[in-house]
Structure formats: C-alpha cells, structure tokens
Image (cartoon, helix red, strand yellow):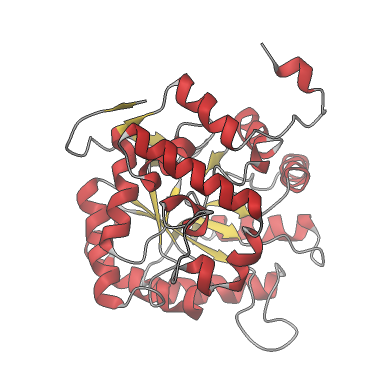
Amino acid sequence: MQTRSNTMGQMHYKTLGKTGIQVSELCFGTMSFGGRADKTTSKEMYQQCRDAGINFFDCANVYQKGVAEEYLGEFIQEERHNVVITSKGGSLMADGPNGRGSSRKHLTQSLHDSLRRLRTDYLDVYFIHHYDPLTPMEEVLRTLDDFISQGKVLSVGVSNFAAWQVARMLGIGELKGLTSIHCLQPMYNIAKRQSEVELLPLAKAENLGVFSYSPLGGGLLTGRYGSDIKASAGRLVENKTYQKRYDGEFYLHLATEFTRLAKERGVEPASLAVAWVASNPAITAPILGAANPSQLQSSLASIDITIDEQLKAEIDTISPPPPPATDRSEETRA
C-alpha cells in the first residue's frame, strides 16, 4: 500500500457507464441529511465535498421522508448544472395500496414529488430502489423511458437488484426498444462481497456504472467495533437493521483484524475500507456516508491511498472472496 502525500490528492473523474456524464471517483450519500445530521451540519458536509472535488450526490425520497431531498435541493441551487444528483423511487412513502412499488402510478407521483423537493427540472440518475415483483419489468421500463423522453430524467439505474433481475431488464429493454439500465447501486464492502459473484462482472461486461453503498459496513470498518471493543453508540448499536446485517462472531473478528491491519499501515480504517472498494475496477464510485465533517474527512482521505496486490491478499485472508458463480474455484486460481 502507498499513500500519495500528507495532503489530500486530486479528485479524479470517471464516465458514468455509457452516458458520457462525468462523475467524481467518490460519491456522497445524503441519507444522514435531516436525520443524524441537522441542516447546518448537512450543509457543512455538502461544502466539504465540493471543496474536495466531489460533484456527485446520491439521494432518495425515502430519506427522512423527503427532508434529505429538500436539504440537497437548497444546497445545489447556485450550481445545479455543476453537480450530478440522483434520487430513488419505489419505497414506502404513503399509506394506502399505491404508496409504494414500481407501478407507473407510484413512480410518476414519486418523481414529481422528488423534483419539487429538489427544486430542479431533471434528475441526472433516477433509481428504482428495490425490485417490485408485482409490476412487470416491461411496465417499469416503459415508465422510465417516458421519464427520459419528457426530459425529467437523464439516465436510470436500479438499487438492491439481483444480477438476474438486471440482466432481464437489459434484455427486455433491448428487445422492446426501451431505455437501457445505465447503472447499479449494490451493497459492497470488505464484509459484504456477494456483488463480486455476478453483479460486478455483469456491470463490467455491459459497461454499467456502479455506485456501491455502505463501504464502511455501517461503521463496522471504522475501528470503533471489534471483539475486544464494546461500543456505546453508532448504527451497529442503535439500529436493529445494521445489527442484524452484521451480527455474529465473523464480523467482530473481521473488524478487529481489519483495524489491526490499517493501524500497521498507518492509515485510518475508514480510509482504507473506502479505498479498497474504489480499487475494484468495476466500481465507478463508492458512496460515502457520514454524520459529521470529521467522519466524512476520514472517507475523503481514501483518495490518498493506493492499494497494492500484497495488501489485497492480506485483506482476502481476513474476508475471503466468495466463490465464482459456477463454484469452480480451482479455475480462478493462478
């Protein structure tokens, strides 16, 4: 592993799949806006990102039931065309039978509400937040295709989809002459590597952008958790979803060993965790999450870290990569 310098390096930019849109190598996720971060803190983090060269901000209508979109919409007003923003639809936003899902009715209402809260005429990327088994994929794609034709959305993506679901949508879009899927948003970190099996190879083969979330594993990989550490605060203590996601001795051992490895290399665990995700060639940008500027700075420092093959191998001993989709592991070894 090498570090570039004692000061933050220069932010680089990548092409978002086949769209031609240029996005920073790090994306900031706004899930904390209006929740763990109040408005003043949220604005500080937004400016911190802009000062670091980040031009890409990920949002969703369900984050604080629209408050995160309202904050982001206010922050971007003076520079809307200099930033790339996303939002998502499909999650539960209202009581009643049509208050969630990927039907044309729900997505249309959700998009219009998001545009209003974000104070913009268009979204650079609109994600379907979750797979909806009740709405045919062709119907979803026709709705998204209409959004693009209307100029309200420039490109579309899916979040939390399985590879077979993405592949079907790509095939239906090509067969029916509808919009393609331009990018994916899967969970991906050192503790959760399932995306390596099929999603990331699919994205690479189809030239899809990948903006992976939770690079710190809900805080697991920040150095605040481990077999010999009893944390009193944080999402893994306070949030039942994250407790369930990272429950068990394997994750505590992983956190302990990863923290040890980071300290041996003289870097913060959070910085190393983000750098590891970004080092995967299929990843366009990891999505950073933070509740305050100090937490964010640790993740921003990831661009100063270069991960070499020796370090990758050491991390593999802590969290082994999953077997390939065929399970013929012997064919992947040198």
Residue plotted at (60% across, 66% down): 243
Along the line of sight, which residue is nearer the eye, 162 or 141? 162
From where the camera sits, is residue 184 visible?
A: no
Rendered-image quadrant of the C terminus: top right
Rendered-image quadrant of the N terminus: top left
From where the camera sits, is residue 333 visible?
A: yes
- Tell me where residue 127 sits by quadrant: bottom right
Task: Tell me: residue 230, above or below residue 157.
Answer: below
Residue plotted at (17% across, 35% down): 6
Q: Residue furthest top?
A: 334
Q: Residue furthest front?
A: 228
Along the line of sight, which residue is nearer the eye, 26 or 219? 219
- Tell me where residue 234 sits by quadrant: bottom left
Q: Position of residue 136 (x, y in %)?
A: 81, 60
**In the image, is 221 to the left or to the right of 57?**
right
Q: Residue furthest bottom?
A: 95
**In the image, is 38 to the left or to the right of 101?**
left
Task: Tell me: residue 155, above or below residue 33.
Answer: above
Q: Position of residue 113 (x, y in %)?
A: 50, 77
**In the image, is 184 to the left or to the right of 58?**
right
Task: Tell me: residue 215, above or below residue 128.
Answer: above
- Tell me where residue 36 sits by quadrant: bottom left
Number of marks: 0
Residue plotted at (73% across, 48% down): 162
Q: Position of residue 231 (x, y in %)?
A: 45, 66
Along the line of sight, which residue is nearer the eye, 79 or 200? 200
Q: Position of residue 29 (x, y in %)?
A: 42, 59
Along the line of sight, which residue is nearer the eye, 28 or 194? 194
Task: Tell me: residue 41, above or below residue 3.
Answer: below
Residue plotted at (61% across, 55% down): 159
